[in-house]
Amino acid sequence: MTDHLTTNSPEWTHRLFELVNAANRSGAALGLETVRTNGELRLTITPLSPELTPAQPVTELVQGRGIPAVIDQTPNVRWVAYDLLATSAHLTEAKIELREGLCLHLAEQALDAFDDVAPTDAAANGTFAERYDRVRQRISSAEAVCPIGTLIELDSAGALVASGINVHGVPWDEATYRRLMTRIMLKPQADDLYPRRTKLDRHISTMFGGARFDWWRELSDAFDGEGIELTSSQRSELEVIDHPVVPSVLRWRELDTLATRHGYEWAERWVHDGRWWPLFHPAGTVSGRWSGAGGALQLPRLLRPCVAVRAGRMLISADLSQVEPRMWAHLSGDPDLVAACTQGDLYQAAGDQLRMARAEAKQAFLAALYDDGAARSRPAAALLRARFPAAVRYLDRATDHGRRGGVVRTGLGRTSPLRDELVLEALNTPQRHRTMEHRKALARRGRQSRNFVIQGAAAELAAAVLAELRRTLHSRDADLVLFCHDEFLVEAAREEVREIVEALPHIVRTAVTKVLGASQVSWPLAVGHGRNWAVASKRSVTES
């Protein structure tokens, strides 16, 4: 690589603007790298197309000098970054916004899975331009099978959204948090921040005969002392036990989960200056769903009033309803399940067809999707199989394919994870010689494959809505402040709310077409707005 042009070069201004404007005219790609040291941001722009001049990277210390305008006002440039999440975060902190971008890291992650190869340290393997060329070639090859370029585009758009949330944080009312925690946990004491949990712990110990051991660590032993055999400590197992201690145990667990995940220690680390600062990682799971830290995807509903905006601002909540079972209907093409998806509440419509309560129908759907063979789920699952046979066969085929070591992928190319060593060993062992561990590994692989495509396609649809929503908000006094599974939270000026809400059905339709093409399934969106997330979550459903 030739030497960089830097701030110390007298001609840097002319060369930098010449390079970026040439790329903007031709729609060429430019590499973008950022380094922050001692509070200073250094930006390097690398030409990734041979026709661009100058051919060498240009580095500049960002101190104004028109750099934000160069990036903001050149919409035709295809910006490329090694780690778009980090690069975009640095630029956002400098008040520079990328409208579009390609993340090489996320592209390679998707392509490695597609090609069924282990990830390699591509960053140490060639120049920026060489690495970009390899990604382009791999995308071109893969697109003979599926439009994986669209998947990479959506993952990259997610990185731009996540960086904005990570940098700006989420509006948070600390007084409301303290008030809610005091109401739930009682007033914190110097030696006990969660008095109600402590009192309940002592009460449960008394009900277990004054047990001196930690009953919550050895729950089966505690119930055994009461003459009750406990095969599992899951909530569904506890709820059917006829013992007066059960409601207290379940309530204690709720309090303990709140204290552990979102208690005062959590707030001290993740909340300050009137903002909650979770960290989001786009496509952070194998299915393409986001991952996060700081409670990013786990804030309990009882704390939603804490996510609140100042006077004159509003929060808009838009939630894709029942996405995974609707995706199941779309992918399986089961005519009766597709018909149930046209009647508003899918679980209620299916329950009416199956002659069972809505809650039972929902449990049956989830049991089928996640291969829950528990005894309580079997009667409903049998009814589901009889009423929607094509849909269940779709899941069974995916499960069998996974057990046989096959890979499954979404329509856009998201591919199930590499087979681990135990699965490969099992596949290479004659069936009669397979051990119990071999059989368990293959069964686990089958369960993972069962709904991978459904989860992956649902994640792609949510990502497409997210990308389209970001474009819609670009010219408005509004920002995406949170993305949680299939729910999108927008902060907007009060006068912007009506037009944004009216645009949402079109945004969903555009996303469905981008990811799925034509679909006979309806994709309703639950929309609400208010000064805090709890109020905004009281939504009405609109058809998209």
Image (tube, rainbow, N blue to C red):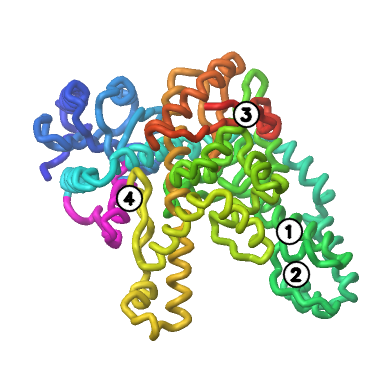
**113 or 266, which is in the foreground?**
113
Label 1 sits on residue: 256
Tell me where residue 225 sits by quadrant.
bottom right
What amino acid is labelled 4 in the image?
Answer: Ala
Q: Quick one: label 4, few (<14), some, or many (20+) residues within 10 Å?
A: many
Circles 4 and 1 in contact, beta carbons < 8 Å: no
Place of residue 445 in the rendered image (x, y in percent of width and height, measured from the top left): 43, 66
Residue 304 visible here = yes
How far is the residue under mark 4 from the one under mark 2?
Answer: 42 Å
How far is the residue under mark 3 from the one under mark 1?
Answer: 34 Å
Q: Secondary structure at mark 3?
A: strand
What amino acid is labelled 1 in the image?
Answer: Asp
Label 4 sits on residue: 110
How far is the residue under mark 3 from the one under mark 4?
Answer: 34 Å
Give the left or right position of residue 37, taking residue 324 as reference: left
Q: Farthest residue in the front direction?
A: 386
Q: Which residues are magenta?
A: 103-126
Single out the mark in the foreground, 3 or 4. Answer: 3
What amino acid is labelled 3 in the image?
Answer: Val
Q: Which mark is residue 216?
A: 2
How far is the residue under mark 1 from the one under mark 2?
Answer: 10 Å
Please check the rendered image and state whether residue 356 is part of the magenta-colored stretch, yes or no: no
Where is 49 relative to 436, above or below? Answer: above
Q: Which mark is residue 353?
A: none
What amino acid is labelled 2 in the image?
Answer: Trp
What quarter of the picture does the N terminus occupy? top left
